[in-house]
Image (spheres, grey):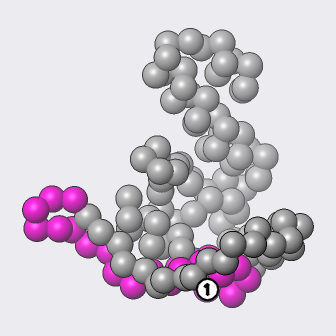
Amino acid sequence: MFEGEALGLKAMYDTKSIRVPLPYKVGSLPTGGSFIIMEFIQFGRSRGDQSALGRKLAEMHKSAKSDKGYGFYVENTIGSTPQINTWTADWIEFYSKHRLGYQLKLISQRFGDSAIYEKGT
């Protein structure tokens, strides 16, 4: 989980568009579990300009665009939930299949109700 997180943070950091912590090291603990060490960023209390944040996020995605299409080099997680990043040529297909579709599939499997999956796909 932390390896994917570190790779994603480093890719975002390298765009120089939005401020994220630079990851320094990931590894396994001898007693089990794992760790990530990253740069400390002092956050202020202000939420700032949300439209400026949106522009920065768009800038980050544009500068990190790959010839492979939409996706990422490794699978990672959203919290403890796997996030599928298979390269897809079309953004709509990527988002519908690997973001929304995958989450709906997990909900359907966990709760045994396929209605929400069918409505979302």
The residue located at (45%, 73%) in the rendering is 6
Could you say which is closer to the camera, residue 112 or residue 91? Answer: 112
Q: Is residue 90 left or right of residue 44?
A: right
Residue assigned mark 1: 14
Helix, strand or loop for disc 1: helix
| Residue 61 percent across, percent down from the top left | 74, 70
Q: Quadrant of residue 30?
A: bottom left
| Residue 5 percent across, percent down from the top left | 46, 66
The residue located at (47%, 62%) in the rendering is 74
Could you say which is closer to the camera, residue 41 or residue 24? Answer: 41
Which quadrant: the N terminus?
Answer: bottom left
Residue 109 is inside the magenta segment: no
The magenta-colored residue range is: 10-33
Q: Label 1 sits on what residue type?
A: Asp
Say if 65 sits above or below 32 in the image: below
Q: Is residue 26 left or right of residue 113?
A: left
The residue located at (42%, 47%) in the rendering is 80
* Residue 62 visible in the current orientation: no
Say if 69 sits above or below 80 in the image: below
Which quadrant: the C terminus?
Answer: top right
